[in-house]
Amino acid sequence: MEGQKMTLSPSQNGARLDLIAAIKGLAAAENYFNSRQLGAKNQSTYRKLLKWYYRELKEDKAKALFQEMDHLQLVNTFLPFMDMMNLFMGLLQPEKVEKLVYEMDRRDIDLNLACYVIWAKNYVATDDEVRIEDVFLHTDFNSIPIQPTFAALALLDDSGIVVPH
């Protein structure tokens, strides 16, 4: 056993990247990511790094990684969009959230409950009640449960933060 290297799956590489970022920091996680061959990376691996970019509010790096993921056709679910929405909300750039929602619509990617909440928080942050209503009108209640959606949106305070009760 000693001296043997274990081959990790792309998902395991993603989990390892996440742990490296949490323990050693983002720079170490980037080094790990960049040292992996393309076959050792998948959507999960890329998303782990994207998640750390939005947590650390690294806009340029997040945008570049998002574009790389898009080029590799890994931006085909709501998850990378949700990460970018969180980034822009963290950077206090709510106007960019709406652009992501429209891009998801253009690509026919359904929003999940969390995306709707982030989108609504975007308008709560700008105190735009008409646009919050637009979120409700846009919401596909056939794909997400109605009661949790209203409950989540009702918990938004004036700052756009979800406040647990």
Image (spheres, grey):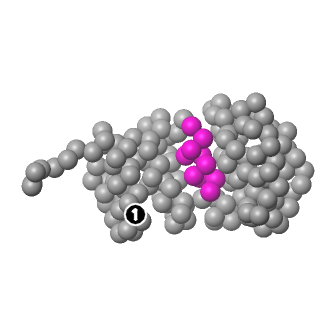
Percent coordinates x, y for residue 75 in the rendering: 52, 39
Percent coordinates x, y for residue 7 in the rendering: 22, 44
Magenta part, dominant SS: helix
Residue at the image position 76 percent from the left and 46 percent from the top: 148
Nearest the eye: 105 or 41: 41
From this viewpoint, is residue 160 visible? no
Residue 60 appears left or right of 18: right
The crowding category of the residue bearing disc 1, from other C-alpha atoms within 10 Å (few below 14, some 14 to 19, many at least 20), is some
Quarter location, residue 158 = bottom right
Quadrant of the snapshot with the C terminus? bottom right
Quarter location, residue 127 = bottom right
Nearest the eye: 59 or 109: 109
Residue at the image position 53 percent from the left and 63 percent from the top: 55
Residue kind at label 1, given as amino acid type: Ala
Residue at the image position 43 percent from the left and 37 percent from the top: 72
Total labels drawn = 1
The reply to whether the magenta stretch includes residue 19 is: no
Residue 59 appears left or right of 98: left
Nearest the eye: 144 or 24: 144
- Circle 1 sits on which residue? 21
The magenta stretch spans which residues? 77-86
